Image (tube, helix red, strand yellow):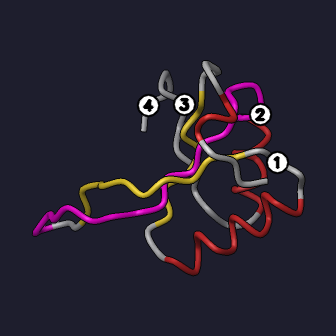
Amino acid sequence: MRREPDYFGDEELDLVYIAKRLSDAKAIEERFTAAGLDYLVEPDEYRGGFLFQTVRTGAFFYVLGSTGDATRTMLTEMGYKPQPLESEPA
């Protein structure tokens, strides 16, 4: 279920996906909600482009650190490439 930042308090959040298209963000929100997953989604900027890099805005999806691995598995099953853990190479 989509939550506000206050809901998570001081809990560590894990960035699991950056949606670059609105259709992807909506599909992920529907799946997370149907699965009963508590998540935070916030707009933020990322750098995109190959030859000419530009700053773009995407939907950044965060979950509690304890559910990060399961959420990454869910995203992979949906056909998305999740964000790696901070300690993993990109």
* Residues at discs 1 and 2 in contact (Cβ within 8 Å): yes
Q: Nearer the viewer, mark 1 or mark 3?
A: 1
Q: Which residues are magenta?
A: 51-68
**Hey, which residue is sitting farthest bottom in the picture?**
23
Q: Quadrant of the C terminus?
A: top left
> Helix, strand or loop at disc 1?
loop
Q: Nearer the viewer, mark 1 or mark 2?
A: 1
Kindly report the distance in space between the C-alpha atoms of the residues bearing marks 1 and 4: 26 Å
Asked whether 75 or 7 is in front, the reply is 7
59 to the left or right of 10: left
Q: Nearer the viewer, mark 1 or mark 4?
A: 1
Kindly report the distance in space between the C-alpha atoms of the residues bearing marks 1 and 2: 9 Å
Residue wearing tag 3: 85
Residue wearing tag 2: 67
71 to the left or right of 59: right
Residue at point 61%, 34% (across, down) = 6
Q: Residues within 10 Å of mark 3 (few under 14, many from 20)?
A: some
Give the vertical position of 67 relative to 42 (above or below): above
Q: Earlier in the sequence, mark 1 or mark 2?
A: 1
